[in-house]
Image: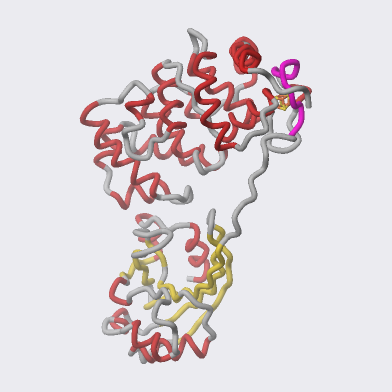
Amino acid sequence: MEQILTADGRAEALRQLPALLLPWYDTNKRDLPWRINTDPYRVWISEIMLQQTRVEAAKEHYIRFLRELPTAADLAACPEEKLLKLWEGLGYYSRARNLQRAAKIVAETGFPRTAAELKKLPGIGDYTAGAIASIAFGQPAPAVDGNVIRVLSRLLGDGRSPEMLKTAFAEELAPAYPAQRRGDFTQSLMELGATVCLPSSPLCLTCPLFALCKTKSDALPARKQKPERRREDKTLLLFRAGETVALCRRNDGVLKGMYGFFAVGASLSDAQIAAFLRGAGVQNFEIGEKRRHKHVFSHIEWTMLARVIELPDEKQLAAADETAGARAIGMPADTEISPFASLKYFTKAQIEADISLPSAFRWCMELL
Ligand code: SF4
């Protein structure tokens, strides 16, 4: 790596970016559905979707979402279950709820045009505010995400932590914004990070910044040690009564407010499942098929065992008491157990059409 740049050297390097990146962007940008125009609503939805989702996975969702909810007013008025169904598969459902909260404000007052005002809306942080302000409103507002941090840390040979770089780049990049095509400049930096300056093995020989770059490799930025994921065991009981299947809304923890299957926060044997159900007051049931599955969230990993529980009818669980069931098998009082009273029955067709079932549970549908 070459010598670290002075403050003036950094500013000069950043000033050269528009002239190098914009022509490259014109010939190399990917054809993506959110690039059809720079309508603030469309930009906003795409940026929120792309926060935790790969471009390929987001494309289809984006098109469907915009078809169903083409304006902020449509999003503001959308029933929650329909909204979550449109978000199904994207995960991090709080994003969808925040979108709707913000849409109710935008539908009343219109879109704010500056990053500072945009940040006052629910779910919009520094990055998204910069992206909307520059792409939709032509403001010189940097949008510094992981891609941009990676490009600039390598370009300037700056090995500080990503957290420090984020603040520094947001300040240093603003004066480098060109007078025209500010949104394209924001997108060109993102695009370079996504397609050329890759996390490992960047394509330096094809990079428009090659001559300027101080690193020309993946040596920067410093890699963060990721904290270990917490591991949790779960037993999912898939209650089926003829044609219908029981789901409940999760009342706590990850996926709070989302539909899922009846869950016990422990790995239970068949004998323990039977004792739990009998202890809870369920007399007529049959334990059916099983499947195991692992689901990884950003900070938690669930190891799950799903068992189909066949019931003669939907009334079987009406008076069931999960606390008594837990006592019957000596389960610690703080173990997560779904309340029987929260179960609702749906046909498979209803679940497919109307219910947003997170991918942490969706795999269970193959058993039903
Ligand atoms: S030359 Fe290589 S490391 Fe430098 S910005 Fe381009 S792709 Fe990234």
Does 75 appear above or below 203?
below
Question: Can you give x and y, in whole percent of width and height, for residue 199 in the image?
Answer: 68, 37
- Depth check: give the residue in front, 291 or 325: 325
Res 296 quadrant in image: bottom right
Q: Which residue is located at x 39 percent, y 55 percent?
A: 356
Q: Would you place residue 287 above or below residue 366 in this image?
A: below
Farthest left residue in view: 108
Residue 308 pos. (x, y %): 47, 77
Q: Residue at x 53, y 57 (%)?
A: 299
Quarter of the image where the N terminus is located: top right
Residue at the far top: name it. 179
The part of the image, by quadrant, that contains residue 98 is top left
**Horizontal relation, residue 44 to residue 306: left or right:** left
Secondary structure character of the magenta stretch overall: loop
Read off the magenta span.
208-218
Q: Is residue 95 above or below residue 137?
A: below
Q: Position of residue 62 (x, y in %)?
A: 45, 37
Residue shown at the point (39%, 18%) measured from the top left: 137
Q: Is residue 213 magenta?
A: yes
Residue occupying the point 60% across, 32% down = 147
* Vertical arrangement, residue 244 with respect to residue 319, above or below: above
Total numbered circles: 0
Q: Does the stretch in magenta take in 110?
A: no
Classify residue 80 as left or right of residue 7: left
Percent of width and height locating residue 232? 53, 69
Picture quadrant of ligand 1:
top right
